Image (cartoon, coloured by chain):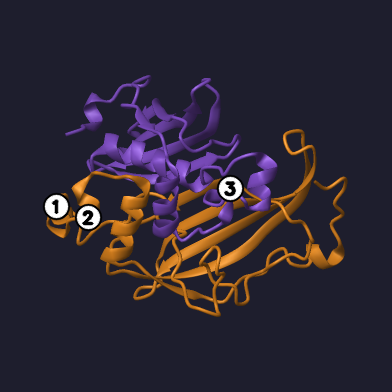
Chain colours: A purple, B orange
Amino acid sequence: MLRFEDIKEGDALPELRKTPTLQTLVKYSAGGGDFNPLHHDYNFPQAKQIGSIIVHGRFKYASLGELVSNWLGHAGRIRKLSCQYRGMDLPNKEFVCKGVVRKKSADGGQKVVELDIWAENAEGKKTTPGSAVVVFP
Amino acid sequence: MAESIELTDDMRAQIGKESPPWDFEVTTTSVRMFARGVGYTDPVYYDVEAARKAGYRSLPAPPTYLGTAVFLPGRCSDTFSGPTEGIPSVNHGLKGLLDGGTETEYLDTICAGDTLVAVQRLEDMKVASSPALGGKMLLLMVVTTYSDKATGKVVARQTSQVIYY
């Protein structure tokens, strides 16, 4: 069980590796309700223009949420989670979700941990940088 | 690709417009579907007993679950599932669409069994250059506020950046 007392600034979160296939993206479309053909139809004009279907930005956002949730293990709750979609990720290519504890504070009795989180591709490019704030009871 | 995009008065007039409230039920099935779509293996998002043991009243909505729409035929987008009635929209004629970024602020824990009311507001709009897209893009900032239907309390706020090019 993760304890606030044991967390140190600079700590790295356990990495979460994903290699989404077309089926993964179809499952995410069903779960999240986004059926934009750009995420499942290689003949969709925008996909043809790009040369491939692309991974939903929201799938990467959700994966960053999973990264934080797995680390947190329900010992605290997420108060804020954000990311920007800076680069496209393609199916059948691995991306890795990573996170680092940027700041830990207990001002006014509120136990707060701020995280830098991101998804990076095989070339090490951060396609999806973001941040999170978690609070502990 | 747009060489240039002009913000017209008509477009600017949409800033600050809000959608009508939309009921948004969080259910065990919708939580499981979303968790599976993301790839969670944590039983707390699938098994009500495991969720209760972890301190939740039912399956908790996984982070970023908000945005998963309640689809009603004829009243929602066939592609994006979200409501289209009275949603502030901008007449720009651009065909390309990309998601720019998302931020969610959670003020309370959301669980299956909750009924939320969502209101979408077009917060801001601007034109920017994108070297990656090779031209101009139109950026919209949309804020969706989710309140608990029973208590009226705001439980979450989600800000999305939508890119048209």
| Mark 3 Cα shell of 10 Å, populated few (<14), some (14-19), many (≥20) | some
Give residue B89's quadrant in the image: bottom right
Amino acid tagged 3: Tyr
Q: CA distance from mark 2 to mark 1?
A: 8 Å
Q: Percent position (x, y) of residue A54?
A: 55, 42
> Marks 1 and 3, how far apart in space?
40 Å
- Locate residue A76 relative to residue B101 in the image: left or right: left
Image point 63% across, 53% down: which residue? A44
Q: Chain of mark 2?
A: B
Tag 2 near tag 1, CB within 8 Å: yes
User: Where, quadrant-wise, is the C terminus of chain A in this rendering?
Assistant: top left
Res. B6 in view: yes
**Label 2 in the same subunit as label 1:** yes
Residue located beneath label 1 in the image = B50
Rounded to the nearest whole Å, what is the CA distance between mark 3 and mark 2? 32 Å
Chain of the residue under label 3: A
Query: Who's the residue at 57% across and 69% down the image?
Result: B77
Q: Quadrant of residue B60?
A: bottom left
Q: Which residue is mark 3?
A: A42
Q: Chain of mark 1?
A: B
What secondary structure is marked by label 1? helix
Q: Quadrant of the rendered structure where residue B101 is?
A: top right
Q: Which residue is mark 2?
A: B46
Q: Say what amino acid the circle numbered 2 marks.
A: Tyr
Q: Which of A86 and A113 lies nearest the eye of the viewer?
A: A86
Q: Which label number is shown at residue B13?
A: none
Residue A111 visible? no
Name of the residue lying farthest toward the front: A43
Image point (43%, 70%), residue name = B70
Q: Nearer the viewer, mark 2 or mark 1?
A: 2
Identified by mark 1, the residue type is: Ala
